[in-house]
Image (cartoon, rainbow, N blue to C red):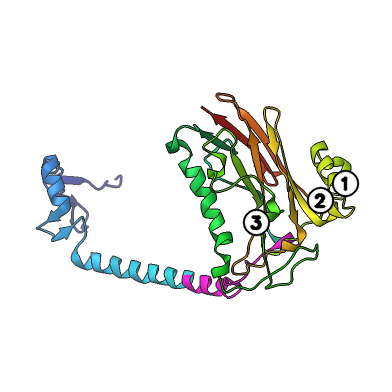
Amino acid sequence: MADQQPTISFTKGDAKRTNGEVDTKIPTYNRAPPRHRSTGDAMKSFWWNPEKREFLGRTGVSWGKIGLFYLVFYSFLAAFFAACMAAFYTTLDTEHTPKYTGDESLLANPGLGIRPRTNLEENHPVIIYSPSGSFSYGDYIDSIDDFFKTYNNRSDLQSKYINCKEDDHIITGEICDFDLGMTKTSCTQEDNWGYTTNSPCILLKLNKMIGWLPHPTKHFSSLPQGLQDHINSLNDTNALSKNVWVWCESQEVEIEQPAPGLPLSFFPYTNQPGYLAPFVMVRLIDVPLEVDVKVKCRAWADNILPRMNRRALGQLDIDIKLH
């Protein structure tokens, strides 16, 4: 007689096996879809679910736990950052000199600065004004006036100024007295620096760079012809080695620049209180109206780069227009 196969019978919610096996219950599941809720009800439930007492999907205990975690976490980050900054500042002399100066600095040399301060367009200083309209040149006059305040009020400072007309470098802490007569310029405050006329004045200086020493140029033939003629007119065989030279040229206008030298005795700058930076004054003579005048100015020394990485350093291309 062939072996009898077990049979399985199903009833509602049950499954039975014969041959003496124990009956096994099969669980029943409710396959009905969840009750449909409107968007407004869903949003209200998300903001506050009174059944589960949840706010934004979390109970008060859950919010407490996560809040405590982030409080500890961000407190640790803040303390770690503060400790790192404190350790970093111990390596700096914030009262006197920056961490890196000279050859260690990202700056190869100081840039050539200009007064009046102007808006920069395409990395060029642009001066636009009307001699008959004070609203157009008032800011230019104020900018130069502000620069001269320190020079005019230096007698009020307690710093001790010394005569530095020789070509020796100053000793740390000393401050050279810059005689405004050294500029030999016709530009004056009473004349509003020429901005009420069509012969405006421009002030040029090297930006302050702590510890930087200029190396006077040794290549006389590389200088512009006009600057060569000026140096020869000084009748001083050592004039070339005593100054950093700042010279401007333009094809559209004549330029008056009687004293284009910055004496070496004013360098290096060591963050001395009351330091007076040397500067030169140039005047543009009879700038025509409605003409785009371009002036190229450059500082000449062996360790001054005119440009670096598309940035102007020891050179300025100035655009001037009168209307």
Determine contact: label 2, label 1, CB under 8 Å: yes
User: How far across and how far down the image is residue 144, in percent?
Assistant: 54, 49
User: How far across and how far down the image is residue 114, in percent?
Assistant: 61, 46
User: With 84 as the anchor, is 255 left or right in this view?
Assistant: right
- Kindly identify the amino acid type of the residue bearing the numbered disc 1: His
Answer whether residue 92 is magenta in the image. Answer: yes
User: How far across and how far down the image is residue 71, in percent?
Assistant: 33, 69
Residue on which disc 2 sits: 302
Mark 2–mark 3 Cα distance, whole angstroms, equals: 26 Å
Residue on which disc 1 sits: 219
Q: Earlier in the sequence, mark 3 or mark 1?
A: 3
- Kindly identify the amino acid type of the residue bearing the numbered disc 3: Leu
Residue at 47 percent across and 44 percent down: it is 139
Answer whether residue 160 is magenta in the image. Answer: no
* Quarter residue 242 falls in: bottom right
Residue on which disc 3 sits: 180
Which residue is nearer to you in this view: 55 or 7?
55
Q: Earlier in the sequence, mark 2 or mark 1?
A: 1
Q: Which residues are magenta?
A: 82-103
Q: Does any portion of residue 198 appear in the rendered image?
A: yes
Q: Is residue 214 above or below residue 312?
A: below
- Kindly identify the amino acid type of the residue bearing the numbered disc 2: Asp
Residue 40: which numbered mark, if any?
none
Which residue is nearer to you in this view: 291 or 178?
178
Question: Local crowd at mark 3 within 10 Å, few (<14), some, or many (≥20)?
Answer: some
Residue at 34 percent across and 66 percent down: it is 70
